[in-house]
Image (cartoon, rainbow, N blue to C red):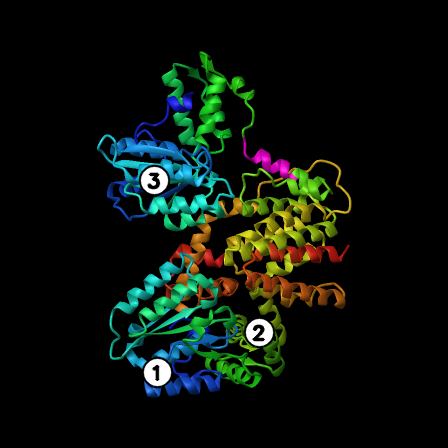
Amino acid sequence: MWVKKYRPETLKDYRGASNEKKELKEWAENWEKGDKPVLLHGQAGTGKTSLVEALANDLDLELVETNASDVRTKNALKDELKEATRQASFFGGNKLILVDEVDGMSGSDRGGVSELKNIISESRFPVVMTANDAYDQKIRPLRNISRQVKLDSVHTNSINAHLKSILEQEGIDYDEGAVKRVARRAGGQMRSAINDLESVALGREKLEKQDVEQLDQRDSRQDIFDALKIIFKTTDAGNARRASDNLDEDAETFMQWVRENIPREYERPVDNEKAYYWLSKADLFNGRIRRRMSWSLMKYIYEFSTVGVALSKDEKYSGWTKYQYPSKIKKMGQTHASRKRMEEITSKIGKKLHLSPRDVKNDLPFYSHLLQHNEALSQQLELEEDETDFVRKF
Amino acid sequence: MIDVWTEKHRPDTLDKVVGQDEITERLQAFVEEESIPHMLFSGPPGTGKTTCAVALAKDLYGDEWKQNFMETNASEERGIDVVRDKIKDFARTKAINADYKIIFLDEADSLTSDAQQALRRTMEQFSDNCRFIMSCNYSSKIIDPIQSRCAVFRFNRLEEEDVKGYIQRLGHAEDFTISEDSVEAVMRVSDGDLRRVTNVLQTAAISTDEIEEEDVYSVSASLKPEEITEILEKTLSNNFIEARDQLSDLMIERGLDGQDIVSSIHREVYNLDITDQQKLELIEALGEFEFRITEGASADVQIEALMAKIAALKD
């Protein structure tokens, strides 16, 4: 397996995540008993386990790995982990304890999580836990005692570079475009990229574009599109309810997908209104959950945005709708810089005028007007020329 | 001097504050006794909360007011920790020629209750040498432990007579005349918000020194986000997706606050081309959606749900 064969041995070999590497290294080097454990989280295939392994290698620590989703009962945990966290290393050196996939522990096993928490807080050695979803309600006790480090999905360029180096080491020639395509379709997951690459390139002399085409889409979005199709096309409560089973997306992202596509599918305003009625209820529940930490309400979010939205239509719409990626998520990414600028400028003006940025934003047309008619004002407000232009636009 | 009238004509002392007589009287008594409690100023925008806080500081500290008074915004984008750090930095040094400093924390109701708890601890930590004045639109959004530590002052919408007197004085100072009808029009478009009154007048005075009724209306239309009207019109004419895009530009790129947009929509509902019965229905729905936003729901989804309701009216 190439995934194993080309695992980074050292932090230097590990591509990307330079800040996280530094943070983990400093933490592990300075760790003393009583310090916080690390909760390393990020979506599947971002290289959490590899990172910890490389870290242990670099610092010459003996890595003790436990996979929380294998070790299901309290007793088993006790045996495996208590020993490891108490006993000095067999080889006399120091240890690094890795508890992999803590969010994979079975949901009913609450005792397991608190046992784990106790063992970890008393550990003589630094502990890293990994999780796909740090906000999974059942690991909340662990999250609260941990220092959180997030691994973002891997940038396509880093994946691309890594894939090319693998091919070079394997002695396989390649078409640049073909490799790029494998990298791109992995959706930020290094592991699936390497698996894909192995499945299309192994045994070939050269990897060509057409070799890549046979590759199955291993795109997590596939699932969400299926879910949307069920919700929007069915009028059966049972079917609709199952649409959110096995989804990778968290509740908020899921709601954004539904929100984006309600008016795209439901062209009759009355259906649109009803669907929004349910979605806005789901959103209200999301607010309550976040405010009061009432995680047990989570099921209603899913029910309102699946069953509620599905039953909002009187009859099915025929034809095919192109479901789209949530524009809010897209826009938040694209406008990051300009939003920051808006915040800076409005707060600068606000300081001069004893106003909050919010007040200034609300009256932006007014300030634009004044700045257009009063040359002296931009100097009085100590605005740079480009800042003045920014406001004048409104 | 800054040529923005709200700032240029902001009173320097408590006895020149427009309206809120009972409050300024109490505050002046505090100044005389040199004994300031923690305070919570609650009330709608443009009723004098910031002005009173600044005037109080000037009355109390005289020339040293700037060193002893810090103004900061609770809704600081970078989070409550940044706010607390600022407070700590400011509170660390001693007040100049006074027993304590004053920290004015604007928009305290934008903080979650967790952040307010943290703030409460900060208040306690520094209460030896600092007094806090917090301002908010709704005191119900401030947690009890903070309210109970504060003297609470409710700022009401200004009385018509007070606003009219202010407009006349402003006319004197800035050399414009304004007819009786235009004053009425200003009152109507500004809803007792003195900042809006001032902004409307300053904008009108750019093009004329004799302000007429129609100047007031055209100016006020140009000052509110025109997009709101446009969004509602598009919604009614069955362009839901376009209207939704425009709303999200307003909220994400312009960064307008959801609650402020709800207020703007509220003002526009009566101008929509729908029956009175339908207007009432919308107002009822608005009430529900605004309440939900205070409950932690996201403003954009709730406003869209309202728009979906509006779009269905024409069906």
Q: Is residue A223 above or below residue B170?
A: above
- Callout 3 environment at 10 Å: few (<14), some (14 to 19), or many (20+)? some
Looking at the image, residue A318 lies above or below residue B160: above
Q: Is residue A222 magenta?
A: yes
Is B99 covered by the magenta stretch? no
Q: Which residue is depicted at the point 74% across and 58% down?
A: B313
Dominant SS in magenta: helix
Chain label for disc 3: A
The residue at which mark 2 appears reads as B190
Q: Earlier in the sequence, mark 2 or mark 1?
A: 1
Identify whether B100 is placed above or below A220: below
Residue under circle 1?
B59
The 10 Å Cα crowd at callout 1, few under 14, some 14 to 19, many 20 or more, is some
Q: Nearer the viewer, residue B194 or A328?
A: A328
Depth check, mark 2 against mark 3: the one in front is 3
Count the labels in the image: 3
**Residue A82: image tag:** 3
In this picture, is A158 found above or below B253?
above
Q: Is residue B15 left or right of residue A60?
A: right
Distance between mark 3 and mark 1 Cα atoms: 66 Å
Residue found farthest to the left: A92
Q: Nearer the viewer, mark 2 or mark 1?
A: 1
Amino acid type shown at disc 3 = Lys
